[in-house]
Amino acid sequence: MAAQTLFGKIWNDHVVRAEPDGTTLLYIDRHLVHEVTSPQAFEGLSVAGRTPRRPGAALAVPDHNVPTTDRRIAIADPISAKQIQTLEDNCRTFGITLFGMNDIRQGVVHVIGPEQGFTLPGMTIVCGDSHTSTHGAFGALAFGIGTSEVEHVLATQCLVQKRPKTMEVRVDGQLSPRCSAKDVILAIIGKIGTAGGTGYVIEYTGSAIRALSMEGRMTLCNMSIEGGARAGMVAPDDTTFAYIKGRPMAPTGALWDQAVTAWRQLATDPGATYDAVVELQAETIAPQVTWGTSPGMVTGVDGHVPDPHTMRDEKLRQATERALEYMALVPGMPIRDIKIDKVFIGSCTNSRIEDLRLAASFAKGKKVAGTVHAMVVPGSGLVKQQAEQEGLDRIFKESGFEWREAGCSMCLAMNADVLQPGERCASTSNRNFEGRQGAGGRTHLVSPAMAVAAAVEGHFVDIRHWS
Amino acid sequence: MDAFTTLSGLVAPLDRLNVDTDQIIPKQFLKTIKRTGLREGLFYDWRRRKDGSQDPAFFLNQPRYQAATILLARDNFGCGSSREHAPWALLDQGFRCVLAPSFADIFYNNCFQNGILPVVLTGPEIQALFEGVTARDGYRLTVDLAAQHVTTPDGVAYHFEIDPFRKDCLYRGLDAIGLTLQHAGRITEYEQRRRTQAPWLFQDVG
């Protein structure tokens, strides 16, 4: 048999039928559901008189709308409350497991899947959310879908797909001290552009990727979509298996051994080829900061805001001028001179226990600058509990950070956590689009370590040299 | 879903790169549990000036584009969030076709689920259409799905590629779920085979 990629093996394992033109009915193993992109799908099922084919393959959780303040108080926004109530009603009607708002297991959908062992290698996983790419960290094929496809998967456990192309993004070498997976993925997006991965599934390879923890790999795969790729993957290895073992929904006993044996076969075969290859050297990656309104508008913290006048492509120049106007930045200014008003540590990109441990280690004994408002939003109730057991909450609070309940929060500001017009935020989230964190708000994407340092200093600093 | 055969309509130009779905429809409109009535949220922030008043410079606020059914756009249109509210809002405004040099994958796919035809033309072709639509009022295009071409008022026809399966579904307005359910037997066979090979995949949640 010809040498195959990780992606190719998983794809082939999930083909239910294929037309001569390549149109494929692809089987979906797991389906994550949240309150924002599912109500119309359930309504569609009801209208057509259909029922979920495998309700036991789905897991639902409210995350986008949930308040990050005291959960014992009813949600102030009646429209948000109704959407969450609708999810609860639909899960009851259709027999889908729900981690409700007051369940300790509630959290950001892409945090709880891995945390519960719901996400496993070799699976196909979908969710009505573009950051489903996160789960590819386990060597799964995981991608975001629209609401019509949510309904399709509920009704049929399948999706109609065309086989995407494959891209290898190879990162070799050793990351600089205090540089992280977030810096790697931002540097990759800076290199390939926000449409560079369109039509591709990315497999991240190389010694720098192998050295990442599972949580780092999740951060990496999470932002594949910001590079245009619907899915990003890392081949499963002992790091992966150690992370999964013992989680509530992971296989146990003989089934575990059987699964691990199968998972060891998933890695890309020697000699398998990709449709495109991109290479980076880890040592060249500085801590990254976005300066614009698209994740590809990014540079090292030791860099400068670009000058549109030096850009020859007219469309690119216009887009840059527009971004700098929105961001209120001056061409040529050092990134380190950018002053910030808010700091958000959280989101499906950077809200797991390792992120919080790292952030706390930098916050310890320091104070958030008087001009800065900073908040930490754990990725799930269990992450919050773990952090509190380790005393991380006390470190954050003593440093002047707010310590919140789990949810998507200010990553997309659907709940009450929003930037005011003109406010500037150092954020560990994934999108710096105009208005993403609140109309008129200005977002700079950074790693958790960089966010803490910015909170303390009131402006960006090079974390490699920060004492 | 409404079938898409031939569309002859007014064109509205949105001359920006990387238009993300957060701009097409911001978060506050995602709290709905319906697919309809999303027109109000379409390009909500871009339609307004800082003081909250309507910005007459924005294309959708100009009377000449009010009745447009074809949206002309730039590269990487629809990037970012998977929200299907983006095509729902475009549809609610009256758009049935979007022309661009490239689209983000999830948005492109979501269009087909809602009877909207996303057409990929080359950069120079899109540029020529931008020049045409800004040069004169009432600029119309005819989009013929069967023939796979877009025809300008001057009679210039641009050919476009489209996946045959998607084309057929859109042309006939087919129910995609209904089509898949015709293969229910094959799905059951697949499940039986996989359950033997990889039983851990069939451990139910809950």
Image: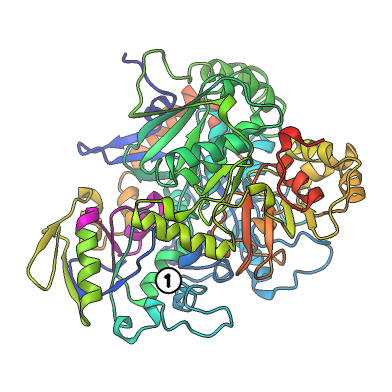
Compared with residue A370, is residue A396 higher up or lower down, i.e. above or below? above
Which quadrant holds residue A245? top right
Q: Position of residue A364 (x, y in %)?
A: 88, 40
Q: How is the image coloured?
A: rainbow
Question: Disc 1: which chain?
Answer: B
Mark 1 surroundings within 10 Å by alpha-carbon count, few (fewer than 14), some (14 through 19), many (20 or more): many
Q: Which residues are magenta?
A: B96-124
Q: Quadrant of the N terminus of chain B?
A: bottom left
Q: Does residue B47 show up?
A: yes
Occupied quadrant, residue A339: bottom right
Q: Is residue A104 magenta?
A: no
Give how far across and how far down residue A20 sits, in percent.
Answer: 20, 36
Q: Dot 1 lies on which element? A: helix
Which residue is identified by label 1?
Answer: B89
What amino acid is at disc 1?
Answer: Ala
**In the image, residue A335 lies at what x, y percent?**
63, 48
Q: Is residue A392 above or below residue B64?
A: above
